[in-house]
Image: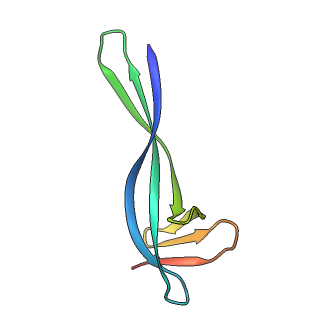
Amino acid sequence: MATTKTVELAEQFNVRDSSGRANRVNVWQTILRTRMLDGSISVAKGLADLKLSDGTELNYIDDDTVQAVMTGEIYKRA
């Protein structure tokens, strides 16, 4: 069995900070693909990694809200 790991852009959405400035969130998804002995391919999704378009790392608060890891700035889905 051979496993390959890729990171793919799974989603993008627009957000606004508390001052009303717009930005874009990129959701990067780790994908593991394993070729099984019978030749089939098993696909498993790993953790999602959220970043603003400038590279700022984010965490989800809820489906419509994310928070910058380093600064604590809150962004709401636009």
Work out which residue is located at the far front of the displayed protein and give it: 54
Q: Position of residue 31 (x, y in %)?
A: 43, 37
Above-or-below relation of 27 to 29: below
Q: Position of residue 10 (x, y in %)?
A: 38, 52
Above-or-below relation of 27 to 45: below
Above-or-below relation of 9 to 61: above
Query: 53 or 11: nearer the eye?
Result: 53
Work out which residue is located at the far right of the displayed protein and give it: 70
Identified at 30% across, 10% down, the residue is 38
Judged left or right of residue 36, residue 59 is right
Judged left or right of residue 59, residue 26 is left
Identified at 55% across, 66% down, the residue is 54
Looking at the picture, the colour scheme in use is rainbow
Q: Position of residue 15 (x, y in %)?
A: 45, 76
Q: Position of residue 71 (x, y in %)?
A: 69, 73
All told, the count of numbered labels is: 0
The quadrant of the rendering that contains the C terminus is bottom left
The quadrant of the rendering that contains the N terminus is top left
Work out which residue is located at the far bottom of the displayed protein and give it: 19
Identified at 55% across, 87% down, the residue is 18
